[in-house]
Image (cartoon, grey):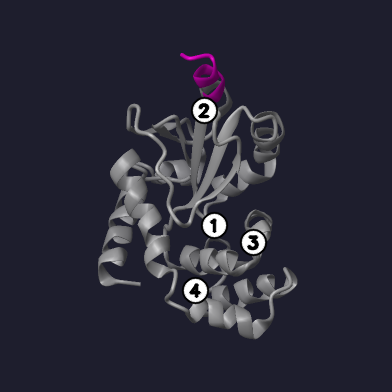
Amino acid sequence: MSRKSWIILAVAAVLIAGGAAWYFLDGGDRITAGNAGATLYQPLPTDHSMGNPQAKVTVIEYASPTCPVCASFMINNYPRLKSDYIDTGKIFYVYRTFLRGPDDAVAEKLARCMPKDQYMSFNDMLFRNQSRWDYEFGIPSPDGVHAALVQLALEAGMGQADAERCIASPADDNAISKVGEDGMAKYAVGATPTFVVNGRGEAGFEKLFSRIDDALAGK
């Protein structure tokens, strides 16, 4: 990963540690993450999308594998989003990994090495097992986190040599970093999870469904 990319990630870390840090710790209310107005969805090569590309509403989620609030959303609220809005064709949903640190990058690289149809299920596995690999649960980084992530990849069906090769490969580094650069530039993403609904980004998910319903109603 380039020096420039990590500088940009460091800036993101400063944003997170400042005005948005309480959100990661306490949940709180939403934080306004920016307003891109009527900015149209512009795909990135790392995007994983579902639903109706012609839907009236596009929802872009920026999440971090190490983020406990993201895990809470994906475990407890994402099933409703998928069944009521994605599967019914009401929205076009795009998932993007926003790096808070190098451990997120390792997790994302492993997810991207999975078969494409297993990408979201592996992310779900990461969120449900954060206590086994996330440094915020006391797992030493980088070695302990590395070993734990490889073990999860093995449990998901990847061979150990493939997992190690995937982590060591620089092939996707720039593309993965680009997600954070793009999110900060277009939507002022500075905390996770951030949800961009038709170009308007807010961190937190407390009002996500009402935001989507308003957008569907043309409000």
Q: Is residue 112 left or right of residue 117?
A: left
Three-letter amino acid code of the residue under disc 2? Val
Mark 4 and mark 1: span between their CA atoms? 14 Å
**Which percent across, then down, holds residue 112?**
56, 65
The residue to which callout 4 is attached is 141
**Does the rendering let one see residue 92?**
yes
Which residue is nearer to you in this view: 184 or 76? 184
Q: Earlier in the sequence, mark 4 or mark 3?
A: 3
Q: Who comes first in sequence, dot 3 or dot 2? A: 2
Q: Report the number of numbered marks.
A: 4
Q: Is residue 97 above or below residue 57?
A: below
Q: Give, as a three-letter code, the residue at label 1.
A: Pro
Mark 3 vs mark 2, foreground winner is 2
Asked which quadrant contains residue 50, the reply is top right
- Residue depth check, mark 2 versus mark 1: number of the one nearer the observer: 2
Q: Which secondary structure is most common in the magenta stretch? A: helix
Disc 3 secondary structure class: helix
Q: Quadrant of residue 178?
A: bottom left
Q: Residue furthest bottom?
A: 161
Q: Which residue is mark 3?
A: 131
Residue bounds of the magenta highlight: 212-219
Instruction: Specify the amino acid type for callout 3.
Output: Ser
- Label of residue 65 in the image: 1
84 shown above or below 189: above
Mark sitting earlier along the chain (2/4) = 2
Q: Residue at x 36, y 46 (%)?
A: 183
From the viewer's perspective, tell me whether residue 132 is left or right of residue 30.
right
Given residues 190 and 40, the one toward you in this image is 40
The residues tagged by marks 2 and 4 sit, at their Cα atoms, a distance apart of: 39 Å
Q: Is residue 77 magenta?
A: no
Residue 122 in view, yes or no? no
Q: Residue at x 28, y 59 (%)?
A: 8
